[in-house]
Amino acid sequence: MRQKEFENRYQQTWDAFAQKLDQVESIKRRKSVLNNDLKRYDEDYRTLCYCLSLARERQYSPYLIKRLEKLVFRGHQVFYQRKIGIFYQIYRFILFGFPAAVRKQSKFIWIATGIFYLPALIIFALVLLFPELVYSIVEPGQVAEIESMYDPGLDKIGRGRDRASDTDFAMFGHYVWNNIGIAFREFAGGFMATLGTLFYLIFNALFFGALSAHMINAGFEQPFFTFVSGHAPYELTGIVLAGAAGIKLGWAIISPGNFSRKQALINVGRECMVLVYGAIFLLLIAAFVEAFWSSNASIAPIIKYSVGIAGWLLVIVYLTLMGRGRIGESE
């Protein structure tokens, strides 16, 4: 759609929203306008956000983008002055904003998926065939330490002897710190024109793939895979999403289009952060499952595998179906 057609299509909506903002920003009329026309205001505001996103994506004129940004900023100020609590905002993000953003950025997510899973599968096969290769990826001391974490005789698998006495809650904090640290490193690596993001994605892929194969070679496949099966759907998906955000950020530096690199980063920043926040959401779930479920050695393997399969199905259905039909997915 050309810019002129775009403006003709939405001009009336923008003008009406600007007029409504003038009314809402008037102290005397704010309460009555919000109470009487609240639902319509929400719809108009989402439409405006959608128009701004399209204008940035299609690289329309800076004048038009700045005009829409100003309207969105004014609308945002009014939108969040309403009595909407933080929990309701989180609810809207989880049910609508996050899965819709994943579908919108599917190109970058598929790229990150390939960059992560392909090296993991290749090194997995190679270490199965050549067991000594694991020591080229992971230091021998760390391999021995990880082996001790999956000793079938442990009451809490996946922790090792050094952390065997830690409570589930303490381990939850440890996993949160570790997982979110990985996500932020992947995202921040995008500022290096994607090179940092690619490094962390491939590094984690090689590490996970090599150790998975080594656990099979060492005869620890059951405690290892029953441990990782429960939280893997959320953790691996979170890692990929953070990587996708970093790649998108880096691509704005590599190919800013008609914008300056600074403006290109500003344009994609919000979309990238939605993926990062979503990745953190999934990584928090992963940390919870890992601390309170995965480490429990008394649960039958068939139950753990079933929960793991159900987790993958839940993630796929959630990201592909949740929030469909909202403003912004109609075109």
Image (cartoon, rainbow, N blue to C red):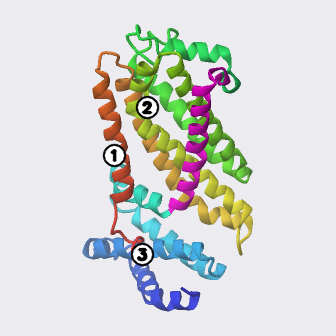
**Which residue lies at the image location 60% right of the left edge and 27% below the top edge?**
129
Spatial CA distance of label 2 from label 1 is 19 Å
**Which residue lies at the image location 68% right of the left edge and 21% below the top edge?**
135
Find out whether residue 135 is within the magenta segment. no
Q: Nearer the viewer, residue 49 or 116?
A: 116
Relative horizontal placement of residue 29, taking residue 205 as reference (left or right): left
Q: Compare marks 1 and 3 and give the one earlier in the sequence.
A: 3
* Magenta stretch, residue numbers: 105-134
Residue 271 pos. (x, y %): 54, 60
Q: What is the three-letter code of the residue carrying label 3?
A: Thr
Q: Compare marks 2 and 3 and give the one earlier in the sequence.
A: 3
Q: Can you name the residue that lies furthest to the left here?
A: 36
Could you tell me which quadrant the N terminus lies in?
A: bottom right
**Which residue is identified by label 1?**
313
Q: Nearer the viewer, residue 110 or 73?
A: 110
**Which residue is identified by label 3?**
47
For label 1, the crowd category at 10 Å Cα-Cα, with few meaning under 14, some 14 to 19 and many 20 or more, is few
Find out whether residue 118 is within the magenta segment. yes
Q: Which mark is residue 287?
A: 2
Q: What is the three-letter code of the residue carrying label 1?
A: Leu
